[in-house]
Image (cartoon, rainbow, N blue to C red):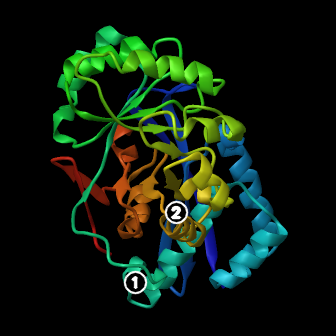
Amino acid sequence: MTTWTLTAHELPLRYLWKISRNASATKTNLVLQATQAGTSGQGEAAPNVRYGETPALLQAQFDDLLAHGLAQADTLPDLTALLAARPVAHALRFALESALTHCLAARAEQPVWQWLGVPAPGSRVSTAFSLPIMEPGEVAGFVAEHHVERFRILKIKVNQESGLDLLRAVAAAVPDRSLLIDGNEAWPDADSLLRFLEVTATIPGLRMQLLEQPLPAACAADYRYLRPRVGVPLLADESVTDTADFEEIARQFHGVNVKLMKAGGYQRGIELLRQTRAHGLLPMLGCMVETSLGIWSALQISALADMHDLDGLLIVRDEPFGLVREEAGELIFKRQ
């Protein structure tokens, strides 16, 4: 029998986390614990409003699972069968699967990555660092306060309204730095995005390395039109959740940002990363705003990705678990 508990963690953030569709100063994430024979494992759920997830919804779904036999889910096949019968939000599914995986790996006295059957992660993993949407006049101060020069790649969140001014300010503050521009589905169509990119090409010191999900996921035809025309690799984020038609994704994008929270588990996340590479696309491993528990979990499969955007814990003030630390733009984590 497996004993399950769920605890909500209110997480004040270091600064206002603003992207094109919403802004927040705090996050409420949930931590699940699975215990068998005195050995425990924990997993984190970071609810995302983009997918209709809220802490209250995840709590209700967890309570429903408890009432329908969750305590008897002692193996991953048991848990998978229960979740097939009673589907839950992807973030909760990941927390459940990762908590049980961590418990079972600990009982087997194996590192999680080994128990999962994936290559060992590096001892230090380089991560991108994200700048939220802010007033252009705030950029220089933010860059100095957070010492962003230590990160090899910066991700810049943008929207239609202030994106150009924000990028001008970033280029002035950190000229010629490799940038990943993330639109979070802010542009409505290909033509409006191409007009935006025409102007960005004239900004001195702006070096755009990647462009992530600028249009809504539903705009498949626009993405197919854009792919050979944008002049910079396109990354899918919201277009790939837990499953995907990778032949179609390869017609729209050059790479995929896989996140375990939207994949709904290690197994699905591993398969998405492998399919991304198999289709000749860039495999990137990303995250939501998460504590070091969620980032530690992602690092277990980090060897499957060529790029890592795992800075979610750096946004959290007073991070509660201390499983991962950042040094010189690289993540160092407790091995077990």
Q: Secondary structure at mark 2?
A: helix
Q: How many marks?
A: 2
Give the CA separation, mark 2 to mark 1: 21 Å
- Which one is in front, 136 or 320? 136
- Residue 220: x %, y % from top left: 69, 41
Q: Residue furthest front?
A: 228
* Residue at numbered disc 2: 276
Query: Horizontal placement of 188 versus 156: left or right?
Result: right
Q: Secondary structure at mark 1?
A: helix
The earlier-in-sequence mark between 2 and 1 is 1
Q: How many C-alpha atoms fall within 10 Å of the one at disc 1: few (<14), some, or many (≥20)? A: some
Task: Name the amino acid type tagged 1.
Answer: Gln
* Residue at numbered disc 1: 114
- Which one is in front, 57 or 21? 21
State which quadrant residue 221 falls in: top right
- Which one is in front, 276 or 301? 276
- Residue at x 74% of width, y 58% of height: 88
- Residue 121: x %, y % from top left: 31, 71
